[in-house]
Image (tube, grey):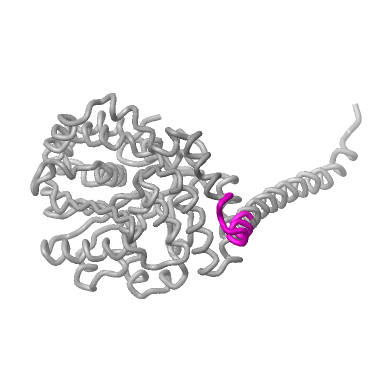
Amino acid sequence: MSNMLDYLMWRGDISFENSPVNEVDQLVFAYISYVIMDDFFTEGITVREAAEKYFEAHTMQEVQKDKSFIHLAPIVLKSAGESVRFGSIKMYNYQNDVNVSREEQFAAVCLYLDYDNSIQVAFRGTDDTIIGWKEDFNMSFIMPVPSQCAALKYLEKVGADSGKKLRICGHSKGGNLAVYSAAKCSAAVREQILSVYNLDGPGFNKKMLEDEGYIAVQSKITTIVPQSSVIGMLLEHEEEYTVIKSSQTGMLQHDGISWQALGAKFVYADDMDTGAKLFDASLKDWLSEMDNDQRKRFVDTLFDVLLASNCDTVSEFSKNSLSSMAASVQAMTSLPEEDRAIFLKTIGLLMTKISDKIGSNVKKRLNIHFNTQEKSQPLLDNSPKP
């Protein structure tokens, strides 16, 4: 089945004038925002020029050796740059900030679509940095997190400075930032927004979902998740979401390259996988039994243990898995006894929740099976004998 790269190959020669921006384009824009362009970005650089600059400094072998789930983002940039559809698009307002002390990871870029004189805002999702993942976890007990504040400031400036119509998108945490900034921006900027695409990004707490800004922009939000979504189902979603098919399984479905596309649309699925539903219900039950202080204590401990490996990125942690795990285990054993006990108890509670949900689901299926058998037995008993 085709994916985003196939889309760029087969439909990349179709201009936006002949086929307006669509949902697969939104994923392309979101993945372009993942590319690190700090060393060569200049205002007005085209997608084609950015791809050329990137691959002047990086080889294809380097890209392929990268083990992060966004490692193919430069390939998306290259394919987009070589296409009629994306190649001449000019980019502006690139921003990339990672601040360990503030536990912030934020990046965004604007792309100018001259076919309808609009601005496409693309927020980068969680990158490969461990601190970026910690900020994601912080969302369970803090709102706003620093990247949400940065996204709001960014959108306000882009909207006010340009005065143009806006489309906003993001994958993973970038989807959350897209929705947050659209909901919290001024009424004037909100009027400029044409659409908001949350591509498998986390939701929000209930207070946010009741916010008047969120309610005002809700009809413009499109949320897309793969069948086994985990990240995209975190926290709460008030808006409806579209479930799509992926060529991967489990957590690996978060990789947008695996999302199946047919023409200008994704391939839709009827519903979420049972396993994803069970995990989502387990996680929500687990979080509901912890207050914000308990959540913070757990997340801080978890990432203190991970950062004890002296790795800055998830890829680095995985590449040096034995030494990384050894350092993390050592850090855990060195925790104060009370902290270690609470941490392990919290993980144990999550495992119990998952086990209970699986058991309940199996029991429900067995009851359906036996009830069906009981109802059909009289029919079998009364059937003509040979």
Left or right for 67, reference 328: left
State whether the magenta stretch is mostly helix, strand or loop. Answer: helix
Residue span colored magenta? 333-344
Who is closer to the viewer here, 309 or 58? Answer: 309
For residue 77, above or below residue 296 = above
Residue shown at the point (39%, 37%) measured from the top left = 316
Image: 296 above or below 71:
below
Q: Measured from the top left, where is residue 270 in percent x and y?
A: 51, 45
Above or below residue 293? Residue 365 is: above
Give the quarter of the figure containing the N terminus.
top left
Q: Is residue 3 above or below residue 177?
A: above
Where in the figure is residue 156, as x and y percent of width and height? 20, 66
Decide whether residue 343 is among the magenta residues: yes
Q: Tell me the quadrant of the picture where the C terminus can be found.
A: top right
**Nearer-the-camera pick, 160 or 366:** 160
Residue 302 magenta-highlighted: no
Q: Is residue 157 left or right of residue 144?
A: left
